[in-house]
Image (cartoon, rainbow, N blue to C red):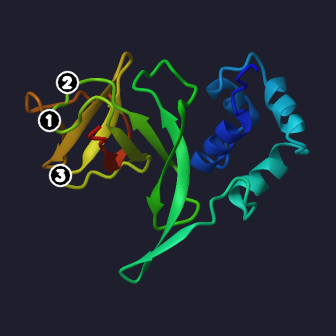
Amino acid sequence: MVDVPDYLTQMAALVRQNPSITVREIADKLQFADSKSVYYWLQKGNIDGINEFKRMVLGDNQEYTEGFAVHQNDQTLYVVRVPLLEWDPKQKKPLGEWCFLHDHPHPRGIFAIQVNTQQFSPWFLQQDILVIDETCTLEEDHWILLQNMKQFVLGRVIHNLIMDPRIFRNYPPSYKRLGTVILQHRSLS
């Protein structure tokens, strides 16, 4: 039997990350030749278009939402899924999804990325998973994910500047801020 990628799950992750995403943007992220492929996969899932799919993903449909909550220290946390990206900016297609606990059942503008370098050791190691919030606040001591034309890099906010922690210098303003690291997962196996 041939392994078929679960495109509907990948599309759902992209919609959760950006609810206003267009069909064209979904096609680009999943590296489809054109937008017709998005409609093809929606039709295979018996879904009558992108708006119905977005309502399913962002609503209470159990197939695309978790519905699982944990009560801890007088706070409710929800299991959420976000797209998991590779450490290569040229790869637009998500590796899959990453699940974690969040204080909102449908957070927006959040994705995960798998570190594929040792250059930010000891803070971040190869295979670490970082959850990124696209709202990039320059709060002291926060870690920021940045991108230049060739690579992703991590910086630390020090005195309202984003510094390269390895050499203690500013990143140039040409580096695009992708978001703030809000969670780090390291597997010790």
Real-space Cα distance between discs 3 and 2?
19 Å
Rendered image quadrant of residue 74: bottom left
The residue that disc 2 covers is 119
The residue that disc 3 covers is 141
Nearer to the camera, 116 or 110: 116
Residue 34: give x, y in percent of width and height: 78, 20
Nearer to the camera, 90 or 124: 124
In what element is the residue under mark 1?
A: loop
Q: Amino acid at mark 3?
A: Asp
Q: Horizontally, is 104 left or right of 138 in the view? A: right
- CB-based contact (under 8 Å), mark 3 and mark 2: no
The residue that disc 1 covers is 122
Return the mark for residue 157.
Answer: none
Camera-near label (3 vs 2) is: 2
Residue 178: give x, y in percent of width and height: 40, 38
Q: Horizontally, is 173 left or right of 20 in the view? A: left
Image quarter hosting the C terminus = top left
Looking at marks 1 and 3 on the same chain, the residue that comes earlier in the sequence is marked by 1
In what element is the residue under mark 2?
A: loop
Q: Horizontally, is 149 left or right of 189 in the view? A: right
Image point (82%, 32%), residue name: 41
In this view, 121 is above or below 100? above
Nearer to the camera, 69 or 150: 69
Residue 138: give x, y in percent of width and height: 27, 51
